[in-house]
Image (cartoon, rainbow, N blue to C red):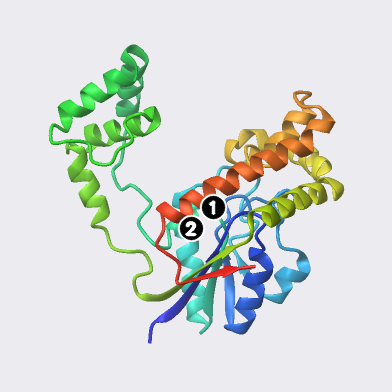
Amino acid sequence: MKQSLHIITGPTAVGKTEYALTYAVAHDAEIVSCDASLVYQGMDIGTAKPSKQELARVPHHLIDLNPVNEPYDIVAYVRDARAAVDDIFSRGKSVVVTGGSGFYLKSFFAPVIDVVKVSDTVRSQVADLYEAQGLAGLLAELWARSPQGVGNLDVKNPRRVLRALERCIASGKDLPTLQAEFAARPEPYGDCSKRYILLGRDKENLKQRVAHRAESMLQYGLIEEVEGLLALGIRDNPSAASAIGYRETISFLEGKLQREELLPAIVQNTLHLVKKQGTWFRTQIPRPDETVFF
């Protein structure tokens, strides 16, 4: 009998925490977070981190792993998530994965880590080419190395073209070959029975929940939390410092944003994230086994 992996996601503020808790209790499961900000210690209010009572209700994993000034990436997440899942299974429990961070979520369905190792020398070579000749120069070199085409690469995105050219140079292979090799890698957690549930709400209701959540964060001390995190070096970790709620509050504390602008900025940026999440759910991960609409 395959072990059970239940994956519950949805946009920010949809109600994932309570749904996942109730679901985990019903399925004798423990929760593995797939939220890129919950891994950081001290980022509590702005992430709507589960409360002590919620954490006591169901065991949680991959929360408060890292000091806020130290980066944490997808490579670390894939490693730690696999270890957490194996640990939970070893104790005869099911696993509920919940959160809305794109690549973290995708890592349960498809490979997300590139195995091609790119040296600093190659990175410097490609960066110099970009500085000297721009995107056109990168594309000319990429086409020279991939005369059969570049597959589904977004050729208007300089960052992706940079990475693609680096991989071609480092591996000595053309881009279609690299893409085919990546696609042929085994599915993560292929030995598990997966059930994927997507949560949703009416657009206006979700907007109201986003606004209420942002108001509550400020009411319960987001500004003071960020002041403390600045003292702990959050600026040294761009991933944490750029998280919604934190980047706007840092701008306010640095005098770049007025107090009356803070709440609208957090709400606007959260709604933009919700839109991006919706696109990600539609295009980057499989269709859900079940959609729950509140």
Q: CA distance from mark 1 to mark 2?
A: 6 Å
> Could you tell me if residue 44 is visible in this image?
no
**Nearer to us in this view, 181 or 257:** 257
Residue at left offset 68%, top offset 39%: 268
Tell me where residue 202 sits by quadrant. Answer: bottom right
Residue at left offset 58%, top offset 65%: 199
> How far from the left and from the top, in percent, is residue 15?
67, 63
**Nearer to us in this view, 99 or 75:** 99
On the image, numbered disc 1 is attached to which residue?
A: 101
**Nearer to us in this view, 277 or 218:** 277
Outermost residue on the left side: it is 148
Q: Secondary structure at mark 2?
A: helix
Outermost residue on the top side: it is 132
Outermost residue on the right side: it is 219
Residue 185, above or below 120: below
Quarter of the picture containing the N terminus is bottom left
Quarter of the picture containing the C terminus is bottom right
> How far from the left and from the top, in percent, is residue 128?
34, 17
Q: Secondary structure at mark 1?
A: loop
Horizontal side of 158 relative to 252 (left or right) equals left
> Could you tell me if residue 227 is visible in this image?
yes
Residue at left offset 73%, top offset 70%: 54
Q: What's the residue type where badge 1 is placed? A: Ser
> How far from the left and from the top, in percent, is residue 185?
26, 58
Q: What's the residue type where badge 2 is placed? A: Leu
**Residue contact between numbered discs 1 and 2, judged by CB atoms under 8 Å:** yes
Horizontal side of 52 relative to 271 (left or right) equals right
On the image, numbered disc 2 is attached to which residue?
A: 105
